[in-house]
C-alpha cells in the first residue's frame, strides 16, 4: 500500500543539568566553584532521502525522540551535546513545524529541523560574582520542543495522467515507460500512484499515473481525492478519455475537470494534453468523426488519438508531452523546487507576537497571581525553588526584568503566591 500521509510525534532531547562543584585540590585553599554546564539536547531532523518512496516507515514507529544532553561535571567540564535524530523522508515531503515553519523537502540531502533540543543548564561557576563567590546552585536543563506534526507526500512528476477509472492510464504508462502498473478490465485497478520515466534521447521526464477520479472526488468520494495533491507538482496534465461503445468523452472530461477545479490548488490552470484512448476499438471513419466532434465542441483543443494495445499515436503523445513540459517551464529546476532560491532554503518561518515585555501578569484568585511568558517560564523552570540560594537569585532576576513591578501594578503584596508554568511559590519582596 502506498502511504502518502503520516502523523508523528517528535521531541527534541532534554538539555543536561549544570552541576554544583567546588575545586578541591591539595595545597589550593578556597579553590572556588568549578561546576560545568550541561550539554544541549539533540534535534529531530528530517532529511530528504531519494531512496525512500513513501511514508510507510512512519506507520511502524510514530515516535521520534532525540538524545538528551549530558550533565556538567566538576573541573569546569561541560556535558556533551545530545546526538540529533535523523529521520529520512522521500523527496516531495511537506511538513508544518511546531512553530509554524513550513518545510518542502525536494532536494536530496535537504534538512529540516522539526523539534529543537532543550538548552543545557549552567553550572555554579557561571553564577560567581563579587557578592556571590561560592554559589551553591546550578541550573537544570530544559526540555526540548515536542508535539505531533503531519507529513504529506506530493510526488515529484513532470506530467500526470488523469482520467476516470478504466480510461487506460495504467496501460498507457506500461506502453511508454518501463513501469509495470496493474492492468485489468475493471475500474479502480490502480489503488496508488505509479511513476514511470520517458526518454527522448536527450531528456528524461517523470510521468505519474494518478488513480482514477470520480464525480465528487474532491469532496471525498472514491479514491481519487486521496491523490489529487500529487497532481499539484505536475507541470502538465495528460487527460485520458475513453473511446468505444457506450463511452461519453464529453461527460468524462467535464467530470474530471470539475474535480480538478474543486480541489482548490489551481490544477485546472495547468497545461493540458487531451488523449482519446482505446482508438483501436473504433473504425477509422468513426474515429475521425469523434475527433472532429471534439474539436468542434472544444475550440482550441487538438486531441491525440492513441491505443495502448497497438501503440498507435503513443509516439506522437510522448513528443507532445516533451513539448508541453518544455513550454511550461523552459528553464525551471526540478518540480517542487523554487527557482532562484538559495539551495536548501525551503522553509518559511511565522513569527507570532508575545505579550508586552515578553510576559503578562494576571490575578487569578485572592492573593494568587499568574505570570505567563516563555522567557519567564524558562527562567523559573531552570531553577530548583527548594534551594534558598536559587530562589534568592530568581527573585533578583524577576526584579531586573520587571516582573515584580508588573505584579505590584496588578495589586500584588509581599507574601502572595506567584504561579509560573507548573511552579508556584511565595514571593516576599
Image: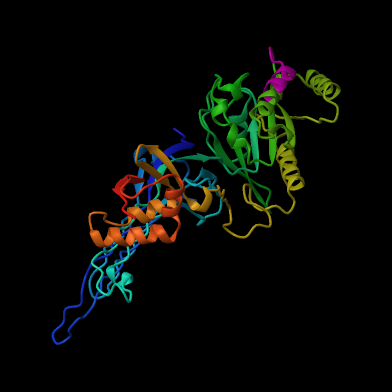
Q: Residue at x 27, y 75 (%)?
A: 133
In this rendering, position of residue 3 left or right of residue 128: right
Question: Magenta-highlighted stretch: main secondary structure?
Answer: helix
Q: Nearer the viewer, residue 149 or 286?
A: 149
Magenta stretch containing residue 247, yes or no?
yes
Residue 78 location in percent, x, y? 30, 70
Residue lying furthest bottom = 27
Q: Is residue 395 shown to the viewer in this render? A: yes
Residue 195 location in percent, x, y? 56, 40
Question: Which quarter of the picture shows residue 319?
Answer: top right
Q: Residue at x 44, y 59 (%)?
A: 401
Q: How many marks?
A: 0
Q: Nearer the viewer, residue 335 or 247?
A: 335
Location of residue 319 with respect to 143 vertically, above or below: above
Magenta stretch containing residue 187, yes or no?
no
Q: Where is the C terminus found, in terms of image quarters?
A: bottom left
Q: Nearer the viewer, residue 174 or 409?
A: 409
Q: Residue at x 77, y 46 (%)?
A: 327
In this rendering, position of residue 61 left or right of residue 257: left
In this rendering, position of residue 197 left or right of residue 72: right
Residue 83 location in percent, x, y? 34, 59
Question: Which quarter of the picture shows residue 24?
Answer: bottom left
Q: Magenta region: which residues?
A: 245-256
Amino acid at each position: 500500500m502506498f502511504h502518502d500521509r503520516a502523523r508523528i510525534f517528535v521531541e527534541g532531547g532534554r538539555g543536561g543539568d549544570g552541576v554544583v562543584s567546588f575545586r578541591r585540590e591539595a595545597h589550593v585553599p578556597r579553590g572556588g566553584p568549578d561546576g560545568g554546564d550541561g550539554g544541549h539536547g539533540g534535534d529531530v531532523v528530517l532529511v530528504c532521502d531519494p531512496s525512500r518512496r513513501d511514508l510507510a516507515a512512519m506507520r511502524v514507529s510514530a515516535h521520534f525522540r532525540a538524545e538528551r544532553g549530558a550533565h556538567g561535571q566538576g573541573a569546569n567540564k561541560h556535558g556533551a551535546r545530545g546526538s540529533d535524530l535523523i529521520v529520512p523522508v522521500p523527496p516531495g515531503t511537506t511538513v508544518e513545524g511546531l512553530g509554524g515553519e513550513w518545510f518542502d523537502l525536494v532536494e536530496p540531502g535537504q534538512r529540516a529541523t522539526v523539534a529543537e533540543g532543550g538548552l543545557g543548564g549552567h553550572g555554579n561557576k557561571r553564577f560567581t560574582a563579587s557578592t556571590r563567590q561560592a554559589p551553591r546552585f546550578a541550573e537544570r536543563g530544559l526540555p526540548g520542543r515536542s508535539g505531533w506534526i503531519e507529513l504529506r507526500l506530493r510526488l515529484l512528476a513532470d506530467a500526470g495522467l488523469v482520467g476516470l477509472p478504466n480510461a487506460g492510464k495504467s496501460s498507457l504508462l506500461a506502453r511508454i515507460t518501463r513501469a509495470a502498473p496493474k492492468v485489468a478490465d475493471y475500474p479502480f485497478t490502480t489503488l496508488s500512484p505509479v511513476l514511470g520515466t520517458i526518454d527522448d534521447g536527450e531528456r528524461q521526464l517523470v510521468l505519474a499515473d494518478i488513480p482514477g477520479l470520480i464525480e465528487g472526488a474532491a469532496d471525498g468520494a472514491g479514491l481519487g481525492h486521496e491523490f489529487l495533491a500529487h497532481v499539484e507538482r505536475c507541470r502538465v496534465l495528460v487527460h485520458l478519455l475513453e473511446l468505444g461503445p457506450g463511452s461519453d468523452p464529453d461527460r468524462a472530461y467535464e467530470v474530471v475537470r470539475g474535480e480538478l477545479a474543486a480541489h482548490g490548488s489551481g490544477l485546472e490552470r495547468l497545461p493540458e494534453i487531451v488523449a482519446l484512448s482505446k482508438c483501436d476499438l473504433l473504425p477509422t471513419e468513426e474515429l475521425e468523426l469523434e475527433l472532429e466532434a471534439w474539436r468542434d465542441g472544444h475550440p482550441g483543443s487538438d486531441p491525440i488519438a492513441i491505443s495502448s494495445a497497438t501503440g498507435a499515436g503513443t509516439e506522437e503523445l510522448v513528443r507532445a508531452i516533451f513539448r508541453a513540459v518544455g513550454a511550461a517551464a523552459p528553464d525551471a529546476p526540478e518540480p517542487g523546487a523554487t527557482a532562484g532560491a538559495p539551495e536548501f532554503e525551503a522553509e518559511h518561518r511565522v513569527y507570532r507576537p508575545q505579550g508586552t515585555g515578553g510576559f503578562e501578569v494576571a490575578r487569578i484568585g485572592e492573593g494568587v497571581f499568574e505570570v505567563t511568558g516563555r522567557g519567564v517560564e524558562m527562567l523559573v523552570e531552570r531553577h530548583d525553588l527548594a534551594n534558598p540560594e536559587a530562589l534568592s537569585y530568581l527573585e533578583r532576576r524577576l526584579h531586573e526584568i520587571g516582573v515584580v513591578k508588573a505584579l505590584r501594578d496588578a495589586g500584588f503584596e509581599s507574601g502572595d503566591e506567584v504561579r509560573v508554568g507548573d511552579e508556584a511559590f511565595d514571593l516576599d519582596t
